[in-house]
Each structure stands twice: as C-alpha cells, then as structure tokens.
Image (spheres, coloured by chain):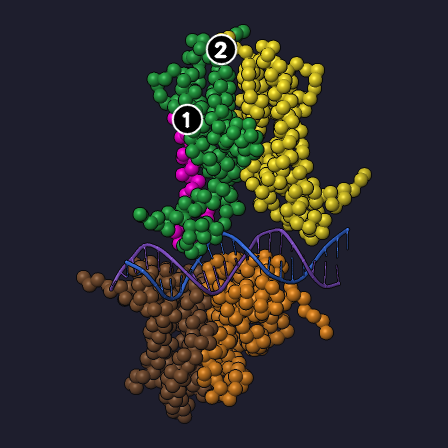
Chain colours: A orange, B brown, C green, D yellow, E blue, F purple
Amino acid sequence: MEEKTKEQAILDAAEQEFLEKGFEAAKTTSIASLAGVNHAMLHYYYRTKENLFNKIFEKKLGIVRDSLFVFFDDPQLPFLEKVQRSVEGHFDFLKANPGLPRFVINELIFKPKRLSQVEETIRKIGKISLQRMAAEIDAEVKRGTITPIEPVHLLIDIATLNVFVFVAMPLLNIFAVETFGSEERFLEARKKENVEIIMRRLKVMNNE
Amino acid sequence: MEEKTKEQAILDAAEQEFLEKGFEAAKTTSIASLAGVNHAMLHYYYRTKENLFNKIFEKKLGIVRDSLFVFFDDPQLPFLEKVQRSVEGHFDFLKANPGLPRFVINELIFKPKRLSQVEETIRKIGKISLQRMAAEIDAEVKRGTITPIEPVHLLIDIATLNVFVFVAMPLLNIFAVETFGSEERFLEARKKENVEIIMRRLKVMNNE
Amino acid sequence: MEEKTKEQAILDAAEQEFLEKGFEAAKTTSIASLAGVNHAMLHYYYRTKENLFNKIFEKKLGIVRDSLFVFFDDPQLPFLEKVQRSVEGHFDFLKANPGLPRFVINELIFKPKRLSQVEETIRKIGKISLQRMAAEIDAEVKRGTITPIEPVHLLIDIATLNVFVFVAMPLLNIFAVETFGSEERFLEARKKENVEIIMRRLKVMNNE
Amino acid sequence: MEEKTKEQAILDAAEQEFLEKGFEAAKTTSIASLAGVNHAMLHYYYRTKENLFNKIFEKKLGIVRDSLFVFFDDPQLPFLEKVQRSVEGHFDFLKANPGLPRFVINELIFKPKRLSQVEETIRKIGKISLQRMAAEIDAEVKRGTITPIEPVHLLIDIATLNVFVFVAMPLLNIFAVETFGSEERFLEARKKENVEIIMRRLKVMNNE
DNA sequence: TATGAATGAGCCTTCATTCAT
DNA sequence: AATGAATGAAGGCTCATTCAT
C-alpha cells in the first residue's frame, strides 16, 4: 500500500481544518499534528499559513465555480430539463462536498479582502453565464413555455435553495431526523422540493 | 440625560463587536475600548469572554426565533396573505438587522457546542410552529386553495430565500449594482421575487 | 529607597542589551529577564521590539549629535583653543558613554534603513556646522595662525581619532595595560595624543 | 575551464555572506543557495555555521594583520618615506577590501569570545612590530629628523585614520558627494589628508 | 558525495484573564 | 467599582542541524 507523502498529508489535514474551522480558528499546530508531522514541516513545505490556505481556497473556489453551470452547457436539452438537471446536479455536488458552502461563505463572502481578490473573475464568469441564460429565457418566454424571470433571480433562487440546505444542515438536523427518518431521506425530499419550487417558478400558470 | 451604565456600555460594545467579527475574532480589549471602559472592568462584570458572548447570543437568538412566525399568529388573515406577509415581514426584519444572519450562521450553525446549548429550545418551538402550520395547510389543501406541501419545507423555503440574500449580500453586490442600479433597488426586486416564488409554490396550477 | 518602575527597568535593560548586542542579536526575552519582568510586560509597555529599540536609538542619537559641537559655539575662545577643547570634550564624552560608538556604528552606519531615516537631519546639522567652521578657519588662515584645511577633513580627523579609541578598546586593551599600566592611563595618554596630532595638523610649520 | 569544487564554492559564498551581514545575520541557507549547493552539503563539509565562519575569519585576519606592516619591512627606505608608504599602502588595501573593516570590527572587536581566541597571536605580532618601530623611531629622534612619539600611538593614529574612513563611509557619503563631487574624489582627498596629518605629527616644528 | 526531509529549540507577539491597590 | 499592571499559554514562524537514503 502506498504511503501518503507528508506534503500531501499536510494539504489534506489543512483542507479538513480550514473547512471545519475557517482561517483564523485553524491552527498550524493542529494541522501539523492532524497530518502527523512536525510543526515545522508545515512551514517547510508551505512557508506560511496564508500560503497553505490559499492552496486550499483556490482549489475549492474552482470547484464551486464550475458546479452551477455544468448542465446549462448542453445544447441538446430542452430548457426546463436543463434547469431541472442543474438544480439536481448542483444539489448532488453540494451533497458530495458538504463542508464547502460553509467554507466559501466564511472565507469568501464574509472576508472583504478575499472577495476582492476574486471579484473580477466572478464578475466575468457571472456576466457570461447570465447573458447566456437571458437569451435562452427570452426565447422560451416568447414561445410561451415559461413565465418571465430575471436571470439573476433564477440563479439566486437555485443557488440559495440548494446551498442553504447544506449550510443549515446542523440546524435542520434537529427536525430532519424525526420528520423524515434520517438525514439521507430528508435530503432526498429536500432535493425534490427544490426542483419543485424552481419548476413552479418557471411554469406558466392558469391565469397567465 | 441618562448616562449609560458601564455594564450596559460593555454589553452594547460587545454586541457590535461580536456581530461584526464573530466570537474568535472579537477581542475583549476592543470591546472594552469601544465601550470606553477599562479592560479589566469587562471581566469584573462578565468574568469571561464566553460569558459575555452568551449574553449577546441568547438575546439575538430570541429575536431571530420570533421573527419568522409573527404573522402566522394572526387568525384574521387568509392563509396565502399570512404567508405573503410572513415572507415580507421576515425580509424586512432581516434588512433591518443585516449583521444578524451572518452572526447566527457563524455562531449557531457552525459551532456544534453552541447549537447543542439551544437545541432543545429550538426543537420545542419548531414543533409547535410546524404543527400549527400543518393544520392550516391541511385545511387549505382540502379547500383546494393551495397545493400540498410539507410544512417544514415551506418554512425552509421561506427562511432560506430570505436569509441567504443577506448572507450573500457582499457577493451579490458584484452584480446587484450594475443590474439593478443600487443595492436598495436590488433588495426591493429580490423581496418581490421571494414573494413570487413562494406564492407560486403554493398556488394551484393548470394541470393539478 | 525608591523602587524603579518596571517600565523604566525594561527601558534600562533594553538599553544595555541593545548597546551590547545590537538590534538583531538582542532578544526580548533577555531584556525582560534582565529587567526582572515577565516577557509579556515588555510588549505591554512597548508593543514591539522595534518600538522599544527606537526609543533607545533616538535618545542615543540626540546625545551623539550634540557631543561634537558644544565647544565650537563659544565665541570667546581663540580658535585653536576651541579645537583643543572640542577634542578633549568629545573624548571625555565618549569615555563617559563607552558603549555608544559601537552602537551607533552598528545600527546607524551599518544599516541603510536606519541611516536613511535620519539622513536629512544629519545633512542639515552637518551643513550648518561645516559652514560655521569654514568661516572661522578662513579667518584664521588669513591671519596666518593656522595652516589651511578643508573643514570636513578636520571634523573627520577629530571624530575618527576620538571615536575609534573607544570602538577598538577591546583590541587596544591587549597592549594598553602592559604599555601604559592601566586602561585609565592609556586613555589619558591617548587623549593627549589626539590633541597633539590635531594641533600639529593645524599649526603653521617651519617651511610654510 | 576548471569547475570550482563545491567545498570551495561554499567557502566563497560564506565569505561574501559573512562579510556582508556578519555572523548572526548570515543564514546557512543563503550561503548554500548562493553557492549553488544543497543546504545540507554545507554541514557535511563544515559541520557547523561557527566552524565555517572561523575558516573565513582566520583567513581575513591574516590578511588584515599583514596589511599594516608591509612597508616597514623595507630596510632601504628612509623612515618618513616608510611611514608615508605605509599609510598609503594601508589605505589602498582597505579601499580594495571595503567590507573588511566592518567585518573585523563586528566580529573581532565587538565579540569578546572571538577576540580572546586570537588575543595571544595579536599580542605577539604586535609586540614584535612595536619593538621594531620603537628602535627606528628612537634612532630618528636622536638624529633630529622626527619628533618623539610613542610607537603604539603612531600605529593607532595610522590605523584609526585609515580604517575609519571605510567604516564610516555610508555616513560620510552624505557629505562626500556634494563636497567632493564623488566618492572616488573624496577618497583621494582623504588619503592625502591622512598622509598629511601623520607626516605633520612626525615632523619637527618651529619651536621644537 | 549528495539531497530532500525532518526536527527541536527559540523568537516575537497576542490575548484572555487575574492581581493588587 | 475601578484600574494599571502582570501573567501564562499559545500561535506563527525561522533556522541550524541531523537523518535516511
């Protein structure tokens, strides 16, 4: 069996520690002992806590960035199906990376410094995505298949509903288990609810 | 004019500091100097940072707890109106307390220790509220005015959509200003969108 | 008997440590234990090592700055006497502050950063002093009482000969004691020699 | 073309680093990377930083030791010429090795430990040189060509005046350029001044 | 010889908390 | 009640030195 290299062990431990506690509350000594290495090793490989953090941060940011738009790129699918798959795909992604939302909120949204570091990138990506969505939405509205909606609102609706489930999980767990039997079952139900509410937001209703 | 007592001044300063920075990043020295009192006074009155924090925490928690259910208690209003007013009222409450969501997320949701402190309280309040909502929803469904929904999902939908706007505000600001002209205008639009999406979630559609 | 305040004790200990070892080699822990206080006290009063150092540095610099020109300001004395008294006075000053030259050399001359901090001050003071000296020297030369010399050279001659005795004292001690009986006797003789060589530099000789 | 051996490369790099920064501020990692070798090699060859330093130190000390007495060994030259050439030769030597004085002062004079390491050697060499000088001076004085002077004083005069120019160069530069046009021109002038003041110290004057 | 990795000691600094008055 | 002073624990980081290969 392959031994994990210490450099990697530090990185893994750092990821765990930073995701769990955030930058300030994370201690390099904890990371080191979590990785099973001498405290100085951490600085040997990554020089500073900040440095080590950025390694984690950038990696995670890239993952998050990509997670929302993957299904919108498929030209074959009908629009509503794209949306549904996006909601589901994004939900599944978050489920597979449960620590991520909290990390991004803590480090990206709550820290002006870090946000401004990546603001330009976010602006660009957002702009492109929104323009593409706007075009598709316009076309669908004209064809009468969906009700009008500002693209940025749709995006926020989806992201919000999905992300917050995982952010609030510790709190929701108080009710989830006794109402749904298990966290797993709750998440299934919640995923359906998110699809449902988004679909209903888009579909044309009686009186429209 | 009444001089504010030192004990109170510390409390106010602590509230400001804790809301702004969270428990770890808040410094007792900052709180003291913000309150205009000697650093040692803070410990004289509240003994530990933890202790002082809890005073703030419990107070804030109470406010948050009440904010969601205020309109549900009005027996006069028709159900959908109750819901609409709840969404709007909750949104306005958050807008008036912009630091609150971040604080609660950071300190309550992200810290197992604190959560377990108040878990029982939350469970009780939640149970009662959910039962009441369930009864009303059932009645409405039977009357054919709304489509069925699990009460806990409705609650999560509302809370999520409202709260997250304010949590994610720094990030959303990147797009808000250039799309809506100002943060203020964005928030107006967003409030409408939240009402819209919740209403649509509840209304009966064509094919149902 | 008055107890020395801890703040002062730290300052004194710092002076001793910094003069003896220079900024880098001085340790805040040493200073603290030398002052008989807890290590954290040092930071309580002076926040940083750099800060504490600057307190010492500026004080010493002021003293050094004044030490060379004190006798030149007396308008009553004949020029050669002024020079003689300056040499002697400067020598005595250095003798009373034996650690000073080394400190100034180490911290001021050998560290570009610190030098540039005070460069402008030094330039101004130097300029004024040199101009005054130049006027007096010119007058004396015209009266035939001294031989011509560039003022800056005279200044360097005096400063060099005096300062270096104390800088090199540890080395000179190897010979001083066995040649002159004691360090004290050596310094007396050396002071005379410095006066002698400066006077001879200025006096008019046979063939001039 | 001969490849420089790694052992030698380390030595050269160490010389540069130690001369430039002194023992404490010099880092073994810097020396290694300056030498283009692995950090551990340095310890492989020289075991400790101290050890490596001593190699440099002793070599430099030998050079310095010899630099002052070279012209005194020439039996052909008349005494005053010997002195003049010594002053000039020593000055030129220092000019060619500008880092040396600072290094010696820092490491030899300011560090009791190092001084005591070489004290005996210095004592012996000094004694011999001084005795030789004493004999020559005595003879010259008897012949009436020079005024009496204690040999050790003459030695100190010369060494001091020459060395200090280079020690204080950063400080002197503040005035040198604007008074003499360039550092080069200042050094020329200063060399003449040093010869002048030493010669005048030795020459017989009017009233003697 | 050579090297990447590893270690331990030490340094500066911050901070919550306590003490003496 | 109030305060300046004091303390201990901990954190991030650097560096000379050693180890394993």
Q: Which residue has dot 1 on it?
A: C89
**Disc 1 versus disc 2: nearer the observer:** 1
Residue A192 visible (yes or no): no
Q: Quadrant of residue B54?
A: bottom left
**Tags 1 and 2 in contact by the CB under 8 Å rule?**
no
Residue D57 visible (yes or no): yes
In this view, the residue in front, A198 or A206, is A198
Q: Main secondary structure of the magenta part?
A: helix
Q: Position of residue B101 (x, y in %)?
A: 41, 71
The answer to whether D73 is drawn above or below residue A128 in the figure is above
* Residue at 41%, 81% in the rendered image: B119
Which residue in the rendered view is the most extreme toward the right?
A: D1
Q: Chain of mark 2?
A: C
Q: Earlier in the sequence, mark 1 or mark 2?
A: 1
Q: Circle 1 — which element?
A: helix
Which residue in the rendered view is the most extreme toward the bottom?
A: B142
Q: Position of residue C165 (x, y in %)?
A: 51, 30
Compared across the picture, whether C179 is left or right of C34 comes to: right
Q: Few, some or many C-alpha atoms within 10 Å of disc 2 (few <14, some 14-19, many ≥20)?
A: some
Inspect the image, locate mark 1, and give the three-letter code of the amino acid beneath it.
Gly
Which stretch appears magenta?
A: C42-70
* Residue at 55%, 27% in the rendered image: C179
Which residue in the rendered view is the most extreme toward the left?
A: B1
Q: Which mark is residue C204?
A: 2
Q: Quadrant of residue A54?
A: bottom right
Q: Few, some or many C-alpha atoms within 10 Å of disc 1 (few <14, some 14-19, many ≥20)?
A: some
